[in-house]
């Protein structure tokens, strides 16, 4: 039996409350992790993937909850990946959310009707746009992740090697040997006068990496080093993140699919950014009005 997941409207209050508990400002990952912790989502629930992307269904519905809370005036995201409560959001009570949501839905419907009428008058296509959460408007990450998932395993490992080299690692190599305990490669990271080996493992997942994968990787590192990097095209469950930083165990740094895409973009590895210059032409009416022959 597939476990049920609350619809986005039932996640409005948990999301707002979690952001308050985080000091009224948090990254998406911090907020998602806090909601999962406070709501007690099970590993079975977190394992359910959304049909159109690498994230799980809980994360996707929380993205919608954030979008609606923004439209309702309770949240804002001053920069990508960071969310804050507004002055109104700090004062809202749980029972006030549903009336605000209904008012926001009415506004959305009115806006759509107005846009459709304008498009009809202009002879444009009146098909409704596919709705996505505010933070999902950049679809280049989905395209990049799709390309990564189509790569052969060894090619993905060599891509990780190139990424680490671009990020400042030296003597980076892919082991490529069977029986290596899940270690795909190793690089040396130099920090001022100190350098140390960092072992890495690559997982081309569309879903979530569980805590047992983190433990297995740490076990493979035992006796070799205590710095590890786990790279995936998917996501990490809340329990996997806790396992990666568990007290008394060597920490494992985690790079999920979204962060991986950002790093590929940062180092121009298969993802390039084109800046378009828009010419802004303005007419100075006073110049013409005061021109004397």
Image (cartoon, helix red, strand yellow):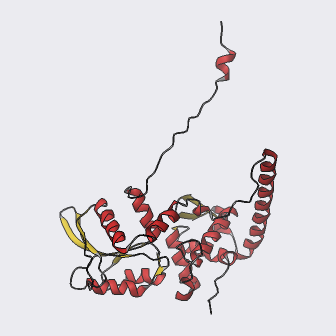
Write the residue at 41% across / 58% down.
270
- For image coordinates 64% across by 26% down, the residue present is 283
Quadrant of residue 104 within the rendered picture:
bottom right
State the image coordinates of residue 112 (x, y, percent, origin top left): 77, 57
Examine the rendered structure and indicate whether residue 237 appears above or below residue 108: below
Q: Position of residue 101 (x, y in %)?
A: 74, 69
Residue found at x 57% / y 82%? 48
In this picture, residue 82 sits left or right of residue 2: left
Which of 68/137 is in front? Answer: 137
Frontmost residue, 84 versus 242: 242
What is the residue that sits farthest to the left in this orientation?
Answer: 193
Q: Is 19 on the left or on the right of 112, as rendered?
A: left
Answer left or right for 65 relative to 263.
Answer: right
Q: Residue 251 appears in which quarter of the rendering?
A: bottom left
> Which residue sits at x=24%, y=70%?
173
Q: Is residue 127 left or right of residue 282?
A: right
* Vertical side of 127 occupied by 226: above or below: below
Q: Is residue 164 in sight in this rendering?
A: yes
Nearer the observer, 129 or 37: 129
In this view, the residue in front, 92 or 165, is 165
Identify whether 179 is placed above or below 190: below
User: Residue 13: x and y, percent?
Assistant: 66, 75
Quarter in which the C terminus is drawn:
top right
In the displayed image of the protein, which residue is found farthest to the bottom? Answer: 1
Residue 3 coordinates in the image, percent (x, y): 62, 89
- List the single residue furthest toward the top: 293
Question: In the rendered image, is residue 42 in sight?
Answer: no
Picture quarter with the N terminus: bottom right
Count of numbered badges drawn on the protein: 0
């Amino acid at each position: 039996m597939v476990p049920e997941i609350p619809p986005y409207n039932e996640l409005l209050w948990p999301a707002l409350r979690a952001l308050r508990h985080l000091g009224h400002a948090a990254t998406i990952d911090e907020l998602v992790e806090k909601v999962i912790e406070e709501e007690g989502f099970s590993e079975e629930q977190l394992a359910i993937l959304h049909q159109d992307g690498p994230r799980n269904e809980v994360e996707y519905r929380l993205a919608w909850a954030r979008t609606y809370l923004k439209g309702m005036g309770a949240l804002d995201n001053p920069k990508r990946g960071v969310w804050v409560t507004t002055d109104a959001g700090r004062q809202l009570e749980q029972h006030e959310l549903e009336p605000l949501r209904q008012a926001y839905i009415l506004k959305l419907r009115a806006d759509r009707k107005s846009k459709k009428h304008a498009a009809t008058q202009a002879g444009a296509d009146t098909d409704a746009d596919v709705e996505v959460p505010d933070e999902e408007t950049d679809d280049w990450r989905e395209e990049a992740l799709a390309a990564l998932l189509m790569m052969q395993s060894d090619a993905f490992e060599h891509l990780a090697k190139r990424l680490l080299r671009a990020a400042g690692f030296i003597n980076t190599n892919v082991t490529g040997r069977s029986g290596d305990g899940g270690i795909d490669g190793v690089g040396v990271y130099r920090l001022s006068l100190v350098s140390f080996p960092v072992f890495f493992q690559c997982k081309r997942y569309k879903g979530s990496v569980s805590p047992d994968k983190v433990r297995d990787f740490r076990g493979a590192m035992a006796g070799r080093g205590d710095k590890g990097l786990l790279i995936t095209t998917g996501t990490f469950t809340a329990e996997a993140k806790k396992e990666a930083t568990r007290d008394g165990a060597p920490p494992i740094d985690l790079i999920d699919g979204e962060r991986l895409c950002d790093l590929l973009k940062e180092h121009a590895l298969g993802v390039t950014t084109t800046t378009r210059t828009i010419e802004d032409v303005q007419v100075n009416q006073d110049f013409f009005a005061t021109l004397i022959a």
